[in-house]
Image: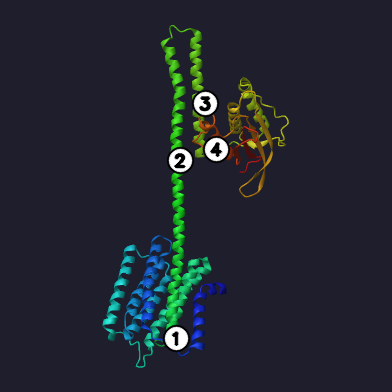
Amino acid sequence: MLKTFWITSRWGITPILLGSLIIGLLIPDFKWKFEFFHVLLEGGGSIIAFILALMIYSRIQTGRLAINYFWLVLSFLSMGILDLAHSQTPPGQAFVWLHSSATFIGGILASFVWFSAFTLRNFYKHSLLLAVIVLAIIFSIGSIVYPEITLTMLDADKNFTFGAKTLNLIGGIGFIVAWWYFTLEYYRHTHISSVYFSNNYILFGLAGLLFELSVLWDGNWWLWHILRALAYMLLMVFFGLKYVQDLKELSSINNDLLKAKEQADKANKSKSDFLAKMSHELRTPMHGILGYANIGLKKIETSTPEKNFKYFTNIKNSGDRLVILLNDLLDLAKLESGKMEMNFAQHSLKDIVHDCILEQIERAKELNLNIPCLDNCTCIYETTQFDDKRITQVIANLLSNAIKFSPSGQNIDLLIEKAELLKKNGEKAAAVLFSIRDYGSGIPEGKYELVFDKFTQCSDATVETTKGTGLGLPICKEIIELHHGNIWAENHPDGGAVFSFIIPVEQEG
């Protein structure tokens, strides 16, 4: 707590200690009647008070300061108006009265910051704000025009009266009460704003208390003026820093919005391209089905069995292609919406790969491609926990792509090996790595992530004649991520593309 006390009051205690030592030891009889400098000091302070009131009010309205700070708005406004009138008044009764009243009213209003449950409606809040402004103006004008109706502030020897000292004392105590509020706020929450506000109010409070020891134009009189000026400057520094911080945040938000807009525009274009591709892919098998069906209907009486068999075969092939496309679309929709359930169980990844090879070996042979066996794989795990149906779907898709992009007479290399996967908590988990390499032209530089994009194909950047919807790899990525793993693509140093995925041996949850 002592550390908190020092942090929330050092900028107030240090100046008054230094000032008191300088005046008491070096210039005890100092007096300086320089009215113009006083006008600049008090007039400038009042302008700053208006600026601070506006800044605090704006931050309240935007929710960055609590509603109880509204009392500080009223405090600064009343002080600003009364001190402005004070700065323009010749030294005398009204001169001291206006300053003492500013300290008294400002301190009382500042102490109300403790009332955190202040929940006036906007209408009443604004009415109170307007009332304080109007009353402060009327009070100032009345004090200047009719100084005889105010409390006596100066005695015959031009010393401050008990009434003047009492007003400043009460106001100073009010500021000290506000300082204690912000000290406790800093102690509880360590907000930097509490440091600035607490030091501001310790300066105002000490200035009010120091009035007791001052005489018009002497060293202590100028000292408490300097303390008030420091208090204003301290909050101006705080809000200046906040303004710079706000500008940086707005700039960052603006940049984020621009990036988001660019990404949204890119996504919309990709979706439009994707939908155009899908409409073409859907039309092609539909045209095949309808076209051969119409031909068969027209020639139903004259067509030979061989031709009918050809028509029905083409209809079936088009239907199969359409079913595959629709299944891919449904899978992608389920994966994106999080509705696809994974049935995790213990399976042999090596057996799954072997089955996928058997399914596509004839197609590979037709293209004169060789797929070496996995007998010498370095995987030491007999079983791994995964959804066999979905991992089969991933491996089958990667193998199909490798066959599609491999030139005739080449190998397709498969690898399964033990690995480690870094979990989100930073711990390492036992994992299994699957890689497949083709000997094709590879992936264009900078397109490694793009091949997994849900709405983008890289076929236009690789092989123009490549057929496909571009849904296979995005589906693979979603499936592997649901297995808490990673999938990536890269080019092999000796040519060709390598697709790899890694999944943990045991699934969590």
Image mark for residue 266: 2
Q: Amino acid at mark 2?
A: Lys
Q: Amino acid at mark 3?
A: Thr
Query: Residue 473's x, y, as percent?
Result: 55, 34
Q: Residue at x 57, y 38 (%)?
A: 445
Q: Residue at x 65, y 28 (%)?
A: 412
Q: Is 4 on the left-hand or right-hand side of 48?
A: right
Where is 204 relative to 439, above or below? below
The residue beneath circle 1 is 219
Q: Nearer the viewer, residue 220 or 202?
A: 220
Answer few, some or many: residues within 10 Å of disc 2's Cα (few below 14, many 20 plus, some between 14 and 19). few
Q: Residue at x 31, y 71 (%)?
A: 133
The residue beneath circle 4 is 447
Query: Disc 4 versus disc 2: distance between alpha carbons?
Result: 15 Å
Where is 490 relative to 75, above or below? above
The N terminus sits in image quarter: bottom right
Query: Residue 450's x, y, as percent?
Result: 53, 38
* SS label for mark 4: loop
Closer to viewer: mark 3 or mark 2: 3
Quarter of image, res 493: top right
* SS label for mark 1: helix
Where is 433 relative to 162, above or below? above
Answer few, some or many: residues within 10 Å of disc 4's Cα (few below 14, many 20 plus, some between 14 and 19). some
Q: Amino acid at mark 1?
A: Gly
Where is 466 relative to 30, above or below? above
Query: Disc 3 versus disc 2: distance between alpha carbons?
Result: 25 Å
Q: Nearer the viewer, residue 307 or 88?
A: 88
The residue beneath circle 3 is 465
